[in-house]
Amino acid sequence: MIWQMFYVLNGVLLLFFTLISLVLFGLRRCLENRKVKLGVRNANIVNVGIFHPYCNAHGGGERVLWCAVRALQAKYDNVKVIIYTGDIETSPKNILGKAKDVFDISLDKDSITFVYLKCRHWVEAKRYPYFTLLGQSIGSIILGLEGLWKHPPDIYIDTMGYAFTLPLFRYIGRCKVGCYVHYPIISIDMLRRVQQREYSHNNRSYVVRNPFLTWLKVTYYRLFAKVYGWVGQCSETIMVNSSWTENHILDLWDVPFKTHRVYPPCEVLHLKSLEHIENSNEIIILSIGQFRPEKNHPLQLQAMYELRTLLNRNEGMWTQIHLVIVGSCRNDEDYERLKNIQDLTKHLSLENNVEFKVNVPYLELIELYKKASIGIHTMWNEHFGIGIVECMAAGIIMVAHKTGGPLLDIIETSEGSQNGYLAADAVEYANCILNIIRSKKEENDMIRDAARASVERFSEKEFEVNFLRAIIPLFNQSI
C-alpha cells in the first residue's frame, strides 16, 4: 500500500512538473513570436528595459533611475530605453519634465519608451494586510508578466527591488538581467527583531505578544529568505547601494563575484557651491525623505518634543527653531500617513515649530538647503541615505540614525574628522541638535567643511562610471 502511494505521488509530481515545463516552453515561444510581431528584434538596436513602477515619484530611487538612463544614453548610441511604469495617468512629457524639475536631469526623450502597466495595484502593500512580502512578490510577477508581454526587452534591469521578476525575464523572456538593490526586502535584522519580539511598523503588537505567532512569522521569514536568495541569484550582475545592503545581499544571495557596490548618485557638485543664508532670528532643521513608515517621521517630532523640554528655560530660543519636513507622496497611503504625522504634530503642540512641504520642485528645495543649518534623518537601518549626503554637501550639519548606511558609509563622528552626528533615540537626537545650536561657529564650520569634503565619492559622475562598469556583462553579447 505504501509503495502504491509512493508511485502515485511520484506520478502526480512528474505530471505537475511536465505541465509546468510545457507552460513555460509555450510562454517562451509566444514571447518570441510577439517580439517578431512587435518588431522588437533589430540587430542595430538594443532594448534595455528598466522596471520602475513608481518612476514619477521624487525619491532617491528615482534619481538612480534617471541618472542610469542618462548614463546609458551617453554611452551607447544604439540603446533604446524602455521604462516599465505604473503611472498610467501621467504622460511621458510630464514624467520627464518632473525629472528635470526635481532632479535637474535632462534626457533624450526620443530614445525612451514608456510602457504603462495597469496591474500596479498588485504590488501595493495595502492589498496584503497579512503575508505582505509574499503578496507583493507574487504581485510583482503579475506586473512583470504584463510588462514582458507588452514590450519584451533584450536587457532587463530592476531598479526598485522586485527581485521575483528576475527569473521571469531571464528564463521566460530570455533576457540578460541585472538589478540595483536599494535594500533587501527581508534581512537578518528583520528576522532578529521578530525573534526578540520587538514592536515595529512591520511587526505588529499582537504578533509580539503571542509566542506561537512569533514562531510562525520567524518560520515564514526563513522560508521567504530562502526563496528570495534563489531569485536574486538569477541576476547576472547585482548592484548594491551601500555597505549595509552589500552585507545583507551577500548573506542572502551569496554571489560575491557578481555583486558590486555602486553608491547612489547624489547632487553634490552644485550643492557644494551653495552659500548659506544667515538668519539670526531663525534656526531651520531640515528633514528630507518620502512619507513612508520606515522613514520614522514620528521620531523627528519626538526629538523636537524632547528639545523643547531641554529648552524649557529658554523660550526665546525655542521660538526660533523650526523643523521643515520635506517629502514626496506616491499614493493615497502616503497621503494618509502624512495626515497622521500632521495630527501627531498638533497632539504634541508642535504646530508652530513644524512645517510640512510635499512634492516640492527642485528650485524650492535649493532655497531650503541655503536656509537650513541642521539636518535630521531618523530611519532605522537606512540602506544608504541620499538626503543625508545632499544635506552635507549643502553645508548642513546632519544628525542621522546610528545604524545602516549613515553609520557604515557616510557619517564619521571621531574627533578630528567629524562630519556629522549619530543618534539612536529622541533624547539623543535632541541633545545632538542642542549641541550644534550651542557650539561655536568655528566648531560647526569645521564639521561642515569635513562633510563637504567627504561627499565627492557619492557624486552623480562617480555613480555613472560605476554603474556602466557593473552592467558590462549584460552588454557583452548584446552590443
Image (cartoon, helix red, strand yellow):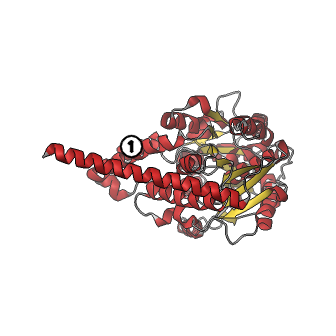
* Residue 82 visible: yes
Q: Nearer the viewer, residue 428 or 5?
A: 5
Q: Where's residue 219, x and y in %?
A: 34, 46
For residue 31, what is the image quadrant?
bottom right
Indicate left or right for 173 with 360 as reference: left
Q: Residue at x 83, y 52 (%)?
A: 278
Q: Where's residue 348, x and y in %?
A: 54, 64
Q: Amino acid at mark 1?
A: Arg
Q: Nearer the viewer, residue 121 or 457?
A: 121
* Residue 337 visible: no
For residue 30, what is the image quadrant?
bottom right
Which residue lies under the disc numbered 1?
222
Q: Quadrant of the C terminus?
A: top right
Q: Where's residue 424, x and y in %?
A: 53, 43
Q: Tag 1's secondary structure?
A: helix
Q: How many marks?
A: 1
Q: Residue at x 44, y 55 (%)?
A: 134
Indicate left or right for 361 with 117 as reference: right
For residue 247, what is the image quadrant?
top right
Q: Where's residue 233, x and y in %?
A: 53, 38
Neighbor class of circle 1 (other Cα within 10 Å; few <14, some 14-19, many 20+) is: some
